[in-house]
Image (cartoon, rainbow, N blue to C red):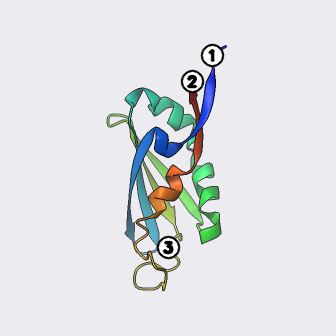
């Protein structure tokens, strides 16, 4: 049996966030393409939706981009009204990529 360890996503991937209205769009790209299948199995729509539930997220759709070894997550109703409708300090949701990168995954040791 091979050894594994639990790490935050930021240790093995980077992310970038954007917005459209009350919807956040977060890309997730592993530093090592060999980790793409592991991330695909662990960073699910359900886990990401649960991570953003406290912000009112109602749906998460993951788009797999295997040719790029990347993912794109579209999270609905997460920006508390969006740029024009929220008094939130981060109306564009740019810092939401950091929240995603705090999620933990299990990788080979």
Residue plotted at (40% across, 72% down): 92
Q: Earlier in the sequence, mark 3 or mark 2?
A: 3
Q: Horizontal placement of 31 versus 2: left or right?
A: left
Check contact, mark 1 vs mark 2: CB within 8 A. yes
Q: Nearer the viewer, residue 57 or 61?
A: 57
Residue 72 percent coordinates (x, y): 41, 50
Q: Residues within 10 Å of mark 3 (few under 14, many from 20)?
A: many
Residue 42: percent from left, percent from top: 58, 38
Are there few (<14), some (14-19), or many (20+) residues within 10 Å of tag 1? few
Relative height, residue 45 to residue 4 (above, below): below
How many numbered markers are drawn? 3
> In which quadrant of the rendered view does residue 43 lie?
top right
Q: Quadrant of residue 50?
A: bottom right
The residue indicated by pointer 3 is 79
Q: Work out whether residue 56 can be spotted.
A: no
Q: Position of residue 15 (x, y in %)?
A: 40, 51
The outermost residue toward the left is 68
Say what secondary structure mark 1 lies in.
loop
Mark 1 vs mark 2, CA separation in Å: 8 Å
* SS state under label 2: loop
**Viewer-closest of 48 and 60:** 48
Q: Residue at x 32, y 34 (%)?
A: 67
Q: Which residue is mark 1?
A: 2
Q: In the drawing, what numbered circle is on residue 109?
A: 2
Residue 1 is at least partly visible in this image: yes
* Distance of label 3 from label 2 (alpha carbons): 36 Å
Q: Is residue 44 left or right of residue 91?
A: right
Q: Quadrant of the C terminus?
A: top right
Earlier in the chain: of badge 1 and badge 2, it is 1
Depth check: give the residue in front, 66 or 108. 108
């Amino acid at each position: 049996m091979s050894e594994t360890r639990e790490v935050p996503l930021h240790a093995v991937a980077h992310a970038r966030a954007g917005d459209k209205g009350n919807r956040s769009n977060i890309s997730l790209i592993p530093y090592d393409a060999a980790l793409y299948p592991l991330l695909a199995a662990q960073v699910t729509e359900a886990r990401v939706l649960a991570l953003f539930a406290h912000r009112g997220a109602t749906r998460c759709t993951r788009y797999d981009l295997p040719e790029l070894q990347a993912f794109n997550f579209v999270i609905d109703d997460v920006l508390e009204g969006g740029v024009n409708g929220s008094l939130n300090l981060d109306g564009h949701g740019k810092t939401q990529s950091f929240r995603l990168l705090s999620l933990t995954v299990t990788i080979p040791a």
